[in-house]
Each structure stands twice: as C-alpha cells, then as structure tokens.
Image: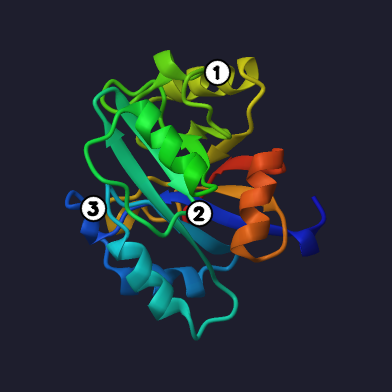
Amino acid sequence: MREQEMIRVDLHLHTKFSGDAQISPKQIVNELHAHPFIKGVAITDHNTLQGYFQVRKLAEPLEDLVIIPGIEVATPDGELILLGVEETPRHPLTVQEVIAFAHENAAVIVLPHPYREKGGLCNLAEKTQAHAIEVFNPSSTPEENRMAEELAKARNLPGVAGSDAHEPSQLWAAYTEVEAESSVDRILEAIRRGHVKPVASTKI
C-alpha cells in the first residue's frame, strides 16, 4: 500500500452506550487524535448509535480523524456488524432481517469473532452475505482467530481487525490498514473491494 493512500482504522470499538463498556466518547476522540498512526475508528456499539453520534460531534473540529458509523446487532444466532448506517434497526432481529436492513441501507456487513462461543456466526457464514470477516479480535483465542482467518480464505472474503475494546486499556489493540483516502465512503468501498490488511497492534 502506498502511504498517502492508506489509513489505519479500528473497525470494532464500543463506548459506554453499549451497556457493557466503560469508554467515554471524549476519551476515544482524545486518544485517537493523539495516536501517532491510527486515525480512523468505527463505533460499533451494541444495538445503538448513541455513542457514534457523540464521538462524531466531538471529532468534528479535528480534520485528521475519520469516524465511521456502525452498530453491532445481536440476533438469536449471533452478532453482525453493520458499517455505514446511521439508523438503528429495530430489535430483536433474525439474521436474515439484519441482512435485509443492511441491504436497504447500503451497509457493509462484517462478521465479527465468528468462532466465539457467544456471538459467533461461523455456522451461518454463507447466509450472512458478509462483505468481510473479522480475522483478528484481541478478545478471541488464537485458535478462534486462526479459524476465522481460514473461514475468510475459504469464502474468499477480506479479513479485517478491530480492538473490540470495552475498557480503556483495550483501545487500539488491533486495527485494519485500509487502502483508501480518509473518508467514510472511500473506506467502506475499500473494505468491499478487499483493499484491507488486519493488524495486531503493539500498544503505544
């Protein structure tokens, strides 16, 4: 990737609005602004966009940051991440209803931690019509991440990574290098095209 066309983005991160996380929107913006190379984040709270809207508002004066709208939607079978949506789907939904919602809103569908016992959707990988699979999640075991990477290869889908941070100490533990300009639309299109590389971060 040429440096001028690449941005590093944490594609899976939670704020306090997820209910099971303790990270404030202000801390996310401050740390992202101070980070030497990660300059983008997808806010993917559980079934809500409240955190995203607060992070986006706080980041508005900072031209170096890209805040991607997202949501991690729970279904009876597991969880799906939708990127690029600014509307909250009703809840609960089946996997197929989430997929329909994603298509209606031109969202990028990411299959997070597919082999995790709680929330994984590896058995429904084909039916999810995902655009990408999360192949590295710091909260998953090495074996779960290895199997996720194999699943992405078997389905010929891009592999991405995110910190899945719920606590401040977990911020930026993983990210994705995206071959794109620093805009939400360009980043989402690059994910669809597979112009991405998952990275396990060394904490700064």
Q: Name the spot of residue 190 as percent of width and height, x first.
A: 69, 48
Q: Earlier in the sequence, mark 3 or mark 2?
A: 3
Q: CA distance from mark 3 to mark 2?
A: 18 Å
Q: Are marks 3 and 2 in contact (CB under 8 Å)?
A: no
Q: Residue at x 31, y 27 (%)?
A: 78
| Residue picked out by circle 2 | 84
Amino acid type, residue under disc 1 in the picture: Leu
Q: As drawn, is 103 to the left or to the right of 44?
A: right
| Residue picked out by circle 1 | 151
Amino acid type, residue under disc 2 in the picture: Gly
Q: Name the spot of residue 146 as percent of width and height, x first.
A: 51, 20
Q: Are marks 2 and 1 in contact (CB under 8 Å)?
A: no
Q: Earlier in the sequence, mark 3 or mark 1?
A: 3
Mark 3, secondary structure of its residue: helix
Q: Which mark is residue 18?
A: 3
Front of the two marks 3 and 2: 2
Q: Earlier in the sequence, mark 2 or mark 1?
A: 2
Q: Residue at x 56, y 55 (%)?
A: 9
Q: CA distance from mark 2 to mark 1?
A: 24 Å
Instruction: Note whether residue 36 is visible.
Output: yes
Mark 2, secondary structure of its residue: loop
Q: CA distance from mark 3 to mark 1?
A: 28 Å
Residue 59 found in image quarter: bottom left
Q: Name the spot of residue 179 as percent of width and height, x first.
A: 73, 52
Q: Residue at x 39, y 20 (%)?
A: 115
Q: Which mark is residue 79?
A: none
- Between residues 116 and 169, which one lies in front from this camera angle? 116
Amino acid type, residue under disc 3 in the picture: Ser
Residue 121 found in image quarter: top left
